[in-house]
Image (tube, grey):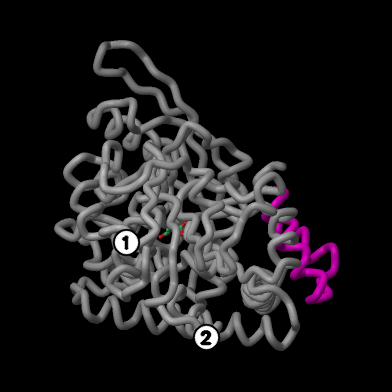
Amino acid sequence: MKAIDSTELYFNRAADLLDLSDNIRTLLIQPKREVQVQVAIERDNGEIATYVGYRVQHDDARGPMKGGLRYHPDVDLDEVRSLAALMTWKTAVVNLPYGGAKGGISVDPTKISRRELEKITRAFIDGIHDVIGPDIDIPAPDMGTTAEVMAWIMNQYGKYHGFNPGVVTGKPVEMHGLPGREEATGRGVGTLTLKTLSRLGRKPQQTRVAIQGFGNVGFHTAKFLSDAECKIVAASDVSGGYYKPDGLDIPAMLRYSLQNKGLSGYAEAELITNEQVLELDVDCLIPAALGGVITSKNAAKIRAPIIIEAANSPTYPDADDELHARGIVVLPDILANAGGVTGSYFEWVQNRQHYQWTLDRVRQELDAVMTKSFERVWEVANERRVSLRTAAYIVGIGRVGRATVLGGIA
Ligand code: GLU
């Protein structure tokens, strides 16, 4: 299944319940603008390398478009389109004054040098600088991109348009970034995991958690939940899964991963595969890596009664139906991982105010936004007797739809 088909299917389920006409559906689904640019650089060895860069701007009815920039070999137009639409619903679910966008380059950042990465980033911005901006479309980090990449974007954009740090978020704190932005997605995931547990009458101390992914999101989620006394029994990265039924020593794993640039060789746990992590007998499963990992092939083998989607699009619709029918509670990506873009919003506000926020303020306001959004989605799910995913789409589509109508269509 194509990524965009899966996002549209979720959209249509909620649109059916909202009785949206076909004309309005087309208006809301179709991206506003799609840009594809050639990204050519001279590599360190003197050879020319050519990549393709995408930016899909999905919707701006509620404000400037917002969304990350992904550097990964699997990036293509279909994936970016689907992720851009997800950003529109995500910013609406948490009620940020933004629309949705996403970008990406099909490149493996682990196989090129830092200098090449910088050149690719600057060449990409050369291609798209006219269609982004603090009031138009604001990129941010995503898979394969870092705060340093965001600093290059700010600098390259500034060469054309002058100093304007609000053009990109997720920047280093020393360069107009926000304290707490880096942990924001994981913190949001952790906060909503605890809320979900509490709604279902479970105690953190009696909750066994498996986390797939130990990148920025998985790493901070693991830290937050282990501080909250959950028992993290499995964690994984590209090198495999690490399983310990009595609970992993998360602070030690965090140190190990920082020192060794990953978990490869971590010997204090049983080595299992990434697929096995998903199928463990745990109370809560958190996919925090790639999309499309829970499909009709493995849905029947999932044993966790709670799934918190820290990654974007980890569950395909046919698998989602199966999980729902089995009574498994799935907290959907557009709510669960919205802490990242919420942190980005605070950074953008900080940049526009030219005033540095404190970490305490960021955490407090992030927790407030996530909690309020969670409560609204939970309420709609109960009122309408639908899954949390459909409820989140109902909230998001409702807000975007109303803004579209209020703004007027010529
Ligand atoms: N890439 C993140 C996401 O998928 C953050 C986007 C942003 O901060 O604009 O939500």
Which residue is farthest front? 246
Residue at the (65%, 46%) spot, across then down = 3
Q: Position of residue 142 (x, y in %)?
A: 41, 50
Q: Callout 2 environment at 10 Å: few (<14), some (14 to 19), or many (20+)? A: few
In the visual, does 84 lie left or right of 68? right
Q: Which residue is mark 2?
A: 201
Single out the mark in the foreground, 1 or 2: 2
Question: In this picture, is 70 found above or below 65?
Answer: above
Residue on which the image places disc 1: 220
What whole-number distance in Å separates the C-alpha atoms at marks 1 and 2? 24 Å
| Residue depicted at 48% across the width and 84% down the height | 198
Q: Which residues are magenta?
A: 5-30
Amino acid tagged 2? Gly
Side of 211 where 90 appears, left or right: right
Q: Is residue 141 left or right of residue 249?
A: right
Q: Residues within 10 Å of mark 1 (few under 14, many from 20)?
A: many
Going by the numbered disc 1, the residue's amino acid type is: His
Residue drawn at x 51%, y 39% as measured from the top left? 54
Image quadrant in which the N terminus is located: top right
Question: For disc 2, does the CB lie below 8 Å from ligand 1?
Answer: no
Sequence-earlier tag: 1 or 2? 2
Residue 19 in magenta stretch: yes
245 part of magenta stretch: no
- Lateral position of residue 384 relative to residue 69, left or right: right
User: Which secondary structure dominates the residues rendered in magenta?
Assistant: helix
Q: Is the residue at mark 1 in contact range of ligand 1, meaning its CB lies under 8 Å from it?
A: no
> Which element carries disc 1, helix, strand or loop?
helix
